[in-house]
Amino acid sequence: MADFKNLTETKTASEEIFNGRILHLYRDTVTLPNGHSTTRETIRHVGAVAVVALNDANEVIVERQYRYPVDAVITEIPAGKLDSKTEDRLAAAKRELAEETGYTADEWISLGDYYPAAAYCDERITMYLARGLHRGEQKLDEDEFLNFSFVKLSDLVDEILSGRVTDGKTQAAVLKACLLLKND
Amino acid sequence: MADFKNLTETKTASEEIFNGRILHLYRDTVTLPNGHSTTRETIRHVGAVAVVALNDANEVIVERQYRYPVDAVITEIPAGKLDSKTEDRLAAAKRELAEETGYTADEWISLGDYYPAAAYCDERITMYLARGLHRGEQKLDEDEFLNFSFVKLSDLVDEILSGRVTDGKTQAAVLKACLLLKND
């Protein structure tokens, strides 16, 4: 096993390629631990939150949403982008759950952070478990289209284990919540 | 709850923004279910594989690798990109494990697919559990820097549950493997 005391790369130049509504793309030049130079294509993203919303019957809210890049309607837990890099993440999680499903929750437990693609994107998703749900009114953006429903946590775990749920944050957050609740 | 029979979006135009070494960025124009038009910033990615490599002592291979976008050395399972869109995913998983760690395996079990960021990227990661490990020689690319070691599966699960492992595919694949092995 090679021993690299210093694995870090040092930026020597940065070129902005694209500044879009969601994605901010840079091609940076870096110096590697061996002194060589290479480029890093890097997406800068505002960050996001995701919520495992569990009711008193041990059912979880899942959404069915069309995702253009993969051209499929997929199953996901409620989630959304921060309004800004500095927005409080718990506040964002409460807002996204309320907007997408109408539900509020009495109890919010952090499930930690999740980097979807640390090789090329700085997006950090903070995951929460929300319990003690209260129903309210869904407030989707005019151009947002999704359906939501409740499924048994144990059924959702089975769907994840059998490969029928392909969304990464949903897999990680739901399995984490399941194991943490078992350890309770 | 709103009922959208058709959640699908239809592409009406596509603009190539950037064609890099790893990321291929498009800004597409789509028609939404309500007839409105909007843009979708979409990364096209070749696809990838990730491997939970488990030895007979119930230890898993983890790597420590610097990830430029998040400016941190993070803990990950062995993983890598496909050589092409059409490469056989199991063959790619075997190659990546051997290159990064030197290990080969007798038994390969699919852990299903994982979309890291389906909202803006089409990358699909296929995850595997590899058992019956045999040691060989690590063959890193000249400009690839990572350390690997074995950790107890139960310790790695604890690290994930406590939030100390932030890599998404590692969280999902290891928790899946843990739950599937428990159900065995």
Image (cartoon, coloured by chain):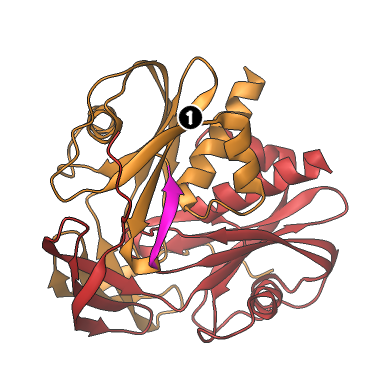
Chain colours: A red, B orange
Residue A179 position in % (x across, y down):
71, 41
Q: Nearer the viewer, residue B160 or A107?
A: B160
Which residue is disc 1 drawn over? B60
Q: Chain of mark 1?
A: B
Quadrant of the rendered image containing residue B129: top left
* x 13%, y 64%: residue: A38
On the rendered structure, is B147 left or right of B85?
A: right
Residues in magenta? B71-76
Q: Is residue B180 above or below residue A138?
A: above
The reply to whether the magenta stretch includes residue B27 is no
Q: Is residue A147 above or below residue A180?
A: below
Q: Residues within 10 Å of mark 1 (few under 14, many from 20)?
A: many
Residue A113 position in % (x across, y down):
57, 61
Q: Main secondary structure of the magenta part?
A: strand
Q: Nearer the viewer, residue A163 or A128?
A: A128
Residue B6 position in % (x across, y down):
47, 63
* x 56%, y 56%: residue: A76
The reply to whether the magenta stretch includes residue B72 is yes
Q: Nearer the viewer, residue B171 or B66?
A: B66
On the rendered structure, is B173 left or right of A173?
A: left
Q: Secondary structure at mark 1?
A: strand
* x 25%, y 70%: residue: A10
Quadrant of the rendered image containing residue B36: bottom left
What kind of residue is marked 1?
A: Val
* x 22%, y 68%: residue: A41
Residue A123 position in % (x across, y down):
44, 69
Is residue B9 in sight in this rendering? no
On the rendered structure, is A169 left or right of A5?
A: right
- Quadrant holding the C terminus of chain B: top right
Is residue A90 in sight in this rendering? yes
Quadrant of the rendered image containing residue B131: top left
